[in-house]
């Protein structure tokens, strides 16, 4: 089961952070069809947020066709976002872990690592488009 977390410094609304975390878990194969999401009550208790925030996130996921609510039972994944590239995730994740270890050894903190990665990601994405 997915464990949600919120980053108050991200500038992203809490409900959208929940949606993004579910979508990411679906894309990485961490959540599969039939898996149950945490109950609204559990998410509220763990994250100390308004129940309407969780309901809004779950509704958005339901409108996207990714989950379905079963009254009295819970909210369940109805569709995955994984594709044929899932097999490549393991080796790539290992490479990324090595890169992160090297970045930490070089003295970079979390914000610096994220900034470096996102800059390289965006530069590469723009180069691919051009």
Image (cartoon, helix red, strand yellow):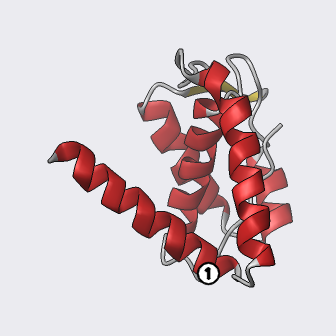
Q: Nearest the camera: 16 or 52? A: 16
Of residues 8 and 114, the one nearer the viewer is 114
The residue indicated by pointer 1 is: 111
Q: Is residue 13 visible?
A: no
Residue closest to the far left: 130
Secondary structure under the numbered disc 1 in the rendered image: helix
At x 80%, y 76%, the residue is: 105
Q: Quadrant of residue 18?
A: bottom right
Residue 93, compared with residue 73, is above or below; it is below
**Residue 128 visible in the current orientation:** yes
On the image, the x and y values in percent for residue 102 come to: 75, 66
Instruction: Establish if 15 lies above or below 58.
Output: below
Q: Is residue 6 above or below residue 1?
A: below
From the top left corner, tell me how far across and down residue 23 is, in percent: 56, 40
Toward which corner of the image does residue 64 lie, by quadrant?
Answer: top left
| Quadrant of image for the N terminus | top right
Q: Residues within 10 Å of mark 1 (few under 14, many from 20)?
A: few
> In the image, what residue occupies the spot 70% across and 22% down?
32
Q: Residue at x 59, y 83 (%)?
A: 9
Residue at image coords 25%, 44%: 128
- The spot of residue 47 in percent (x, y) is 78, 67
Q: How many marks?
A: 1
From the viewer's perspective, is residue 119 above or below residue 41?
below
């Amino acid at each position: 089961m997915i464990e949600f977390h919120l980053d108050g410094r991200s500038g992203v609304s809490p409900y959208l952070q929940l949606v993004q975390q579910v979508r990411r878990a679906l894309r990485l194969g961490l959540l599969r069809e039939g898996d149950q999401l945490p109950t609204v009550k559990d998410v509220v208790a763990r994250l100390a947020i308004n129940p309407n925030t969780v309901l809004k996130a779950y509704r958005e996921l339901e409108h996207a066709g990714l989950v379905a609510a079963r009254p009295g039972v819970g909210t369940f994944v109805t569709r995955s976002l994984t594709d044929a590239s899932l097999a490549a995730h393991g080796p790539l994740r290992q490479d990324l872990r090595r890169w992160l270890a090297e970045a930490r050894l070089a003295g970079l903190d979390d914000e610096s690592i994220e900034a470096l990665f996102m800059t390289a990601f965006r530069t590469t994405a723009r180069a691919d488009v051009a």
